[in-house]
Structure formats: C-alpha cells, structure tokens
C-alpha cells in the first residue's frame, strides 16, 4: 500500500508547482463552500468582464483607444442592465404575482382532471395514491406560501443588498476591464516565476471561459426573445415570465430545458385544456428547444466548451450542492477549470517522470 502511494506521489506530485496547484484548489474549494455568498458579486463581475472584453476588443479594432473602448463597453452594459431591470423585470413580476394568485384554482382543476384516473386505470393508479399526491402538492404550496411570507417580511436587507450589488458590480466590471493587466500582474506576483503547468491551465481556461460567457449570454437572449415572441403570438398567458424562464434554462444544459417544460405545459393546459391550442404551444416549444440544441449551441460553442454531457450534469449536481443556486449558475465555468487541470496536469507530469526515469 505504501509503495502504491509513493508511486502515485512521484507520478503526480513530484514537482513543487503541482503541490502548489493542489493547495490552491483546496483553498478555493473551502472558500467556495464557506464564503460563497461573499464571492458571488466578484464572480458575476468576472464573468461579465469576460463578456464585455469582447465588446471592448471589437471597439479597439474599429480604431478607438483601449480606454475609450472600456468606457463605451461599460456604458453599453450599464444601459442594457438598467433597461432590463426597469423594463422586463416589472412585467415579469406582475405576471408572477398573477400566476401565484391563480395557482390554487389551477391545482383544484388538476385535482378534478386527475380524479378520473383511478376509475379509468385502476391497475395503474388508486384513489389512495391520488390523494397522497394531491396532499403532497397542497402541502408544498402551503410551505411555499409560508416561505414567501417569511422571506417577504425579511426582504428589506435583501433589497438593500441587491441595490448595493447593482452599483458594485458595474464598478467592478469597469475596473476589471480598465486595470486587467495590473490585476493579473498583481495576482501572478504571488506565484512562482517558473509556472509552466499553471500557464498551460490558464491559457486553456481563459479562452474557453471567455467564449462560453459571450456565447451563453447570446444564447439566453435569443432563446428567451424567440420564446416570448412565440408564446405571445400563440396567446399563451404569462408569456414574458415563461419566455424568461426558457431563456434562463439554457444556463443548466439538459436539466434546465426539462424543468421548464413543466410550467410551460402546465400553463398551456390550464388555459386551453387538451385542445389544438395546447398542442400548438407544445410543438412550438419543442421546435425552439430543438433548434437551440442542434443549431444555435453548435454555432455558438463549437470551440468554447468541450465537455461530455455526463460531466456537465455531474458538475451541476456537485457545484450546486456545494454552492446552491450560484453553484448551478457557475457549474460550466468551474467544470471547464477542472477539465483544463485534468488535461494539462497528468500529461505533463507523466512525460517529466518518464524523462527522469
């Protein structure tokens, strides 16, 4: 057993840089688990800076100076952010309140629709099972209402925190863009002068995360806007709310689309029942998701993220368990980092070890 551990150590941890990387990973995971809420605005600002860096680079290529490009890209981001906050958010909030008011009537209608199942399919569904399911749903709705009331009573500190973040995040994005080289040099000053492994990991991760951030924002905007347009044309209630949910669902690959299917089908069913209008909505939603997965995603992410679907799902589950909702949001960038480490680390160390032996 000792020989096996010794061989493993010499194979993967024979260099100082690999030990340093292992320590950095351990410290990062601990900070993520215990200080995740504090790190959220910083992580959001970093991702947005990656996004706006592409805009700034494009402006520089058109002849503007780097400083002017940073200022213009920051102003564009700030304008889009406040336009979204003041335009779409109030509409979505009104629709969310309306949906919450109609939820009890929807649940009662669902209970009546499901009540025929025990008589029609006694071998599959019993009345006792149906009662248990409806009791569970009603209990969850009551728990959700109580939780919403509790959160509402204590929402003033949260609202203040959101207002502070609305000021801090644009400021951090601006300084990340303006002083990017200074911040990078300051960070690198704590690392060894010779760091080929860390440099290889950074080179791969930097490009992939930049492409992912820009591509994902474009995907959210396109999918959300198209879904809102389709739902509005078809006359579906809560079109803005459902369009926003469909757009945000692309953040969680595979899982997000499956989860958002439930509220879309739920609202369509209770608006029209099993009529042609319901099937039109389901068909249109299926077409949007199909075009997103088979046309838009390959077009935007052909060179951005090279991760297996199983790896993506595991990353969502793991980082979501460690960091909650924000872990789900940042699961792909963090999985990209892990993939870059795995890709760069073993090959380099194995070659080095073989050269020594």
Image (cartoon, helix red, strand yellow):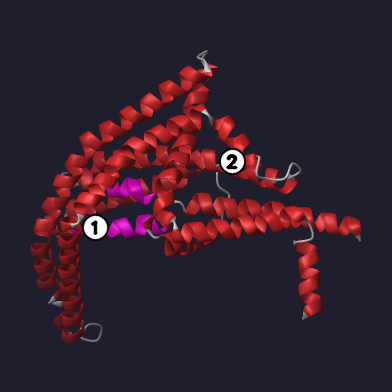
- Res. 53 in view: no
Q: Is residue 264 magenta?
A: yes
Residue extent of the magenta highlight: 243-266
* Residue 206 disc label: 2
Residue tagged 1 = 263
Query: Which residue is rendered at x = 49% and y = 36% of the image?
Result: 50
The x, y position of residue 92, in whole percent, is: 20, 44
Few, some or many C-alpha atoms within 10 Å of disc 2 (few <14, some 14-19, many ≥20)?
some
* Residue 167 disc label: none
Residue 189 vertical placement versus 329 (above, below): above
Quarter occupied by the N terminus: bottom right
Q: How many marks?
A: 2
Mark 1: which secondary structure? helix
Which quadrant of the structure image shows residue 262? bottom left
The x, y position of residue 269, in whole percent, is: 17, 59
Residue 48 vertical placement versus 127 (above, below): above
Quarter occupied by the C terminus: bottom right
Q: Nearer the viewer, mark 1 or mark 2?
A: 2
Q: Main secondary structure of the magenta part?
A: helix
Few, some or many C-alpha atoms within 10 Å of disc 1 (few <14, some 14-19, many ≥20)?
few
Name the side, left or right, on which 322 lies relative to 10. Answer: left
Task: Work out whether mark 1 precedes mark 2 in sequence or the reverse, and give the earlier one.
Answer: 2
Query: Which residue is rendered at x = 17% and y = 62% of the image?
Result: 150
Q: Looking at the image, which residue sits at the far top?
A: 63
Q: Nearer the viewer, residue 69 or 102?
A: 69
Q: Looking at the image, which residue sits at the far right?
A: 357
């Amino acid at each position: 057993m000792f020989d096996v551990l010794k061989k493993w150590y010499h194979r993967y941890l024979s260099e100082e840089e690999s030990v340093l990387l292992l320590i950095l990973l351990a410290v990062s995971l601990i900070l993520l688990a215990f200080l995740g809420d504090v790190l959220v605005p910083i992580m959001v600002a970093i991702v947005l800076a990656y996004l706006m860096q592409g805009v700034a680079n494009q402006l520089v290529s058109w002849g503007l100076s780097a400083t002017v490009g940073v200022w213009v890209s920051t102003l564009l981001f700030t304008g889009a952010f406040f336009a979204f906050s003041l335009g779409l958010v109030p509409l979505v909030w009104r629709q969310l309140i309306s949906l919450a008011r109609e939820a009890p009537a929807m649940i009662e209608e669902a209970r009546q629709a499901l009540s025929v199942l025990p008589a029609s399919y006694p071998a599959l569904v019993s009345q006792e099972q149906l009662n248990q399911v409806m009791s569970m749903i009603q209990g969850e709705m009551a728990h959700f209402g109580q939780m919403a009331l509790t959160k509402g009573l204590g929402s003033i500190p949260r609202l203040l925190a959101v207002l502070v973040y609305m000021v801090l995040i644009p400021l951090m994005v601006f300084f990340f863009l303006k002083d990017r080289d200074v911040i990078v040099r300051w960070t690198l000053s704590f690392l060894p002068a010779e760091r080929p492994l860390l440099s290889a990991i950074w080179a791969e991760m930097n490009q992939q995360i930049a492409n992912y951030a820009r591509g994902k924002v474009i995907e959210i905007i396109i999918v959300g806007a198209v879904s809102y347009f389709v739902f509005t044309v078809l006359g579906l209630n809560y079109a803005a709310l459902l369009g926003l949910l469909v757009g945000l669902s692309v953040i969680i690959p595979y899982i997000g689309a499956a989860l958002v299917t439930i509220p879309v089908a739920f609202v369509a069913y209770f608006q029209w029942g099993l009529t042609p209008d319901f099937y039109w909505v389901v068909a249109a939603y299926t077409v949007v998701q199909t075009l997103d997965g088979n046309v838009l995603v390959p077009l935007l992410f052909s060179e951005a993220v090279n991760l297996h679907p199983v790896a993506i799902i595991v990353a969502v589950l793991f980082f979501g368990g460690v960091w909650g909702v924000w872990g789900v949001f940042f699961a792909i960038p963090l999985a990209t980092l892990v993939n870059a480490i795995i890709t760069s680390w073993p090959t380099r160390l194995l070659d080095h070890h073989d050269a020594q032996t």
